[in-house]
């Protein structure tokens, strides 16, 4: 009788072995995932930095053409709140048509001449004829790290309702980059009030009273403000030592590349004990502080660098870990820590206060 030999049955994984393999795979994923996320954020951060570099170069090309940097935004100039009906002068801020911002003026220098040529910059930026164009999503104005969205948004009035101009709801394209007004702010209080308080020395907290009469230049000490026409020669603190542009993620509030609309307000997307809505100029401008002689409870001037926990709609705000990018007056881009010395941040905001800038 022949001996029959049968093949041995294959031995499969035991339950314990299978669980060990799964645990090893899960551990590897847990170790690799942060590295992948960090690599992705590094790429997004690099792209954000590149966008600001392009904006800085565009600013200097504009200056080369017009012998000055663009205004923070263009508004019908009035010293008494009066003007033609087409100007739509706001009774409080005295903001008026046409409203186009610094960023809209840079379009021809950002390979967006087709968008710029479709606009009539002599008419109001909110005119119905511009509706389809001013809602454009322009990549160079968007930071890929921002989680607050990159689609057009509806402007709001003082109550938080939709802003209506000429019978139409106003919607603008979004931006994650803002221009610096300096240490001082001149938003809703640069119109109907005739005088204002400004700091003359941020170290001694000395202040003085100035007459405004609608002229933001009497308050602003930075490169961009209403109807500004800043030249390189005006930056006596040095263009390398002066912040021009920075980040403001739409996670905190909505900003636009288009312009400023009379009666509009910027509202925070989340509330803190320190923040609240502010006037239309903050759609495109921010400031560093101190402003208006404001002091905190310790008697120190209120200064808010990037990501400072006041979370004002009129400050810089970034979702990059540890700080945010700024574009300096010479076009260079720096990453500034959110823990920067407060007085140093204020010094970097002004163009001609004569402060001595340290390392940052």
Image (cartoon, rainbow, N blue to C red):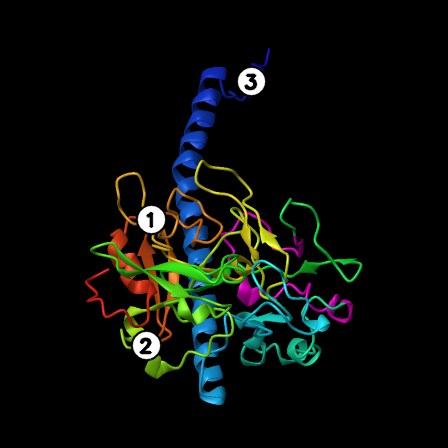
Classify mark 3: residues with Cα within 10 Å, few (<14), some (14-19) or many (20+): few
- 220 versus 318 height, above or below: below
Identify the mark nearer the N-term, 2 or 1: 2
| Quadrant that contains the N terminus | top right
Farthest residue to the top: give it.
1
Q: Dominant secondary structure of the magenta stretch?
A: loop
Q: Nearer the viewer, residue 122 or 270?
A: 122
Residue 328, percent from left and from top: 35, 69
Q: Which residue is mark 1?
A: 302
Identify the mark nearer the N-term, 3 or 2: 3
Residue 211 in view:
yes
Q: Is 142 a magenta residue?
A: yes
Q: Which element type, helix, strand or loop, lies under badge 3?
A: loop
Front: mark 3 or 2: 2
Q: Which residue is mark 3?
A: 5
> Which segment is the magenta one?
128-155
Asked if marks 2 and 1 touch (Cβ < 8 Å), the reply is no
């Amino acid at each position: 009788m022949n001996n029959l030999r049968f093949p041995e049955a294959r031995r499969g994984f035991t339950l314990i072995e299978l669980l060990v393999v799964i645990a090893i795979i899960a551990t590897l994923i847990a170790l690799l995932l942060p590295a992948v996320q960090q690599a992705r954020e590094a790429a997004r951060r690099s792209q954000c930095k590149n966008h600001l570099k392009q904006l800085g170069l565009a600013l200097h090309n504009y200056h080369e053409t017009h012998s000055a940097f663009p205004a923070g935004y263009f508004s019908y100039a009035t010293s008494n709140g009066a003007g033609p009906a087409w100007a739509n002068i706001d009774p409080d801020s005295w903001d008026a048509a046409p409203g186009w911002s610094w960023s809209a003026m840079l379009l021809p220098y950002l390979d967006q001449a087709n968008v710029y040529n479709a606009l009539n910059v002599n008419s109001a930026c909110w005119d119905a004829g511009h509706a389809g164009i001013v809602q454009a999503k322009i990549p160079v104005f968007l930071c890929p790290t921002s989680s607050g969205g990159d689609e057009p948004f509806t402007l709001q009035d003082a109550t938080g309702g939709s802003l209506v101009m000429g019978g139409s709801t106003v919607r603008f394209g979004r931006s994650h980059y803002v221009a610096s007004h300096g240490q001082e702010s001149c938003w809703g209080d640069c119109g109907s009030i005739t005088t204002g308080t400004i700091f003359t020395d941020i170290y001694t907290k000395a202040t003085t009273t100035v007459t405004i009469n609608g002229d933001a230049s009497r308050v602003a000490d930075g490169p961009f403000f209403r109807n500004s026409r800043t030249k390189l020669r005006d930056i006596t603190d040095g263009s390398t030592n002066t912040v021009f542009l920075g980040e403001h993620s739409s996670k905190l509030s909505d900003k636009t590349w288009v312009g400023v609309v009379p009666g509009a307000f910027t509202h925070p997307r989340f509330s803190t004990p320190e923040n609240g809505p502010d006037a239309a100029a903050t759609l495109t401008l921010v400031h560093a502080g101190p402003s208006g002689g404001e002091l905190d409870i310790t008697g120190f001037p209120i200064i808010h660098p990037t990501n400072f926990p006041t979370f004002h709609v009129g400050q810089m705000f970034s979702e990059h870990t540890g700080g945010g990018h700024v574009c300096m007056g010479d076009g260079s881009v720096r990453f500034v820590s959110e823990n920067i010395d407060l007085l140093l941040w204020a010094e970097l905001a002004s163009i001609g206060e004569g402060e001595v800038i340290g390392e940052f």
